[in-house]
Amino acid sequence: MGSLRRVLIGALLLAALSFASRPSLAQTPSPLAAWQYSVGEVLTPLGGPVPEWRFTFGGGVNVQPFYDGSKRYRIEPSFVVDIRYRELLFLSDGEGLGINLIHGTNYRAGVALGYDLGRDHHLQERLAGLGNVAVAPEGKIFGEYFLAPVVISADLRKGFGGHNGVIGDLGAYVPIPVAPGLYVFTGPSVTVANERYLQAYFGVTPTQAANSGFPVFTPHGGFVRTGWGVTTAYQWTEHWWLEAQGAVQYLLGDAGRSPITEDRAEMTVGANVLYRF
């Protein structure tokens, strides 16, 4: 059993070292597991000296719910921008603008300014009368730690405008080498939020009830969702990568009980073509 464990950990470290030759794959925010927005980034130092600059650009397509709790889905384009300076600074569509305040060969932690896309009541007739949740910046603190064979990820975000709430994620994933140049990352996540966040996305005020026909609903803070994500990356050439990701999630607590929610179970899938230099 000990020998088998050493072989498994060795294979996972090989995947980490191979994957570390490229920057993390950022995604336009969607119902993915939170760790999928920075998958593999904490593994980068395992590959040796980190380049001074790393650039990744690309695009593709996503399929995701119209809004949290929707049973209907939409297809939309995705755009990838990921720029990193050493192990210090980054600008990423998935992680925002941030700095790694501490970092090492198997960990990193820092702060970032990201964004929340809000919710447009024009997306679906069902949202009529609820008003919008405005697009707004989010301050974030985050941390990642590679404890072979698992990467543990956590973050805490505060909205400034928009939902004005606090939301946090805890997740973990395992890097799996499938074939030369092909890597799979998979693992669970759980999300919690305070009452203000849940009120913005799942609550119904008396005014909204009068305008929409939904009953008044005042959610309490707590668990929002749990889910499982999978990200696959394939190195096509030295600079070109193909990437696909998917996730399933299940709304918990008052998020699942909200009258706005049509279906507690949701999923998202997407694919991108990436160029790194």
Image (cartoon, grey):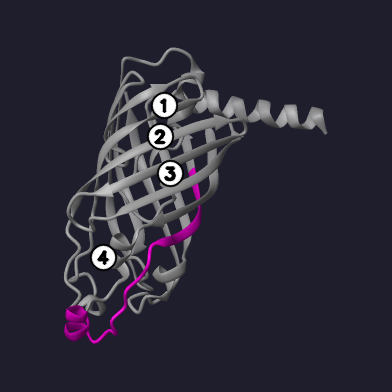
Spatial separation of the CA atoms under disc 2 and disc 4? 38 Å
| Mark whose residue sits in front, 3 or 2 | 3
User: Along the polypeptide, which appears first: circle 4 or circle 3?
Assistant: 3
User: Along the polypeptide, which appears first: circle 4 or circle 1?
Assistant: 1
Q: Is 144 positioned to the left or the right of 201 in the image?
A: right
Crowdedness of circle 4 by 10 Å Cα count: few (<14), some, many (20+)?
many
User: Along the polypeptide, which appears first: circle 1 or circle 2?
Assistant: 1
**Mark 3 and mark 2 residues within 8 Å of each other at the beta carbon:** no
Q: Is residue 235 visible?
A: no
The residue labelled by disc 2 is 241
In the picture, the quarter occupied by the N terminus is top right
Residue closest to the eye, 209 or 96: 209
| Mark whose residue sits in front, 1 or 3 | 3
**Residue in the picture at 42% in, 34% down:** 143
The residue labelled by disc 4 is 200
Spatial separation of the CA atoms under disc 1 and disc 2? 9 Å
Residue closest to the eye, 73 or 220: 220
In the picture, the quarter occupied by the C terminus is top left
- Mark 1 lies on a secondary structure that is loop
The residue labelled by disc 1 is 22
| Mark whose residue sits in front, 4 or 3 | 4
| Mark whose residue sits in front, 2 or 4 | 4
**x, y percentage for residue 219?**
35, 70
Spatial separation of the CA atoms under disc 4 and disc 3? 24 Å
User: Going by the picture, which residue comes out furthest to the right?
Assistant: 1
Q: Amino acid at mark 4?
A: Ala
The residue labelled by disc 3 is 36
Q: Amino acid at mark 3?
A: Gln
32 w.r.t. 210: above or below: above
Q: Is residue 204 visible?
A: yes
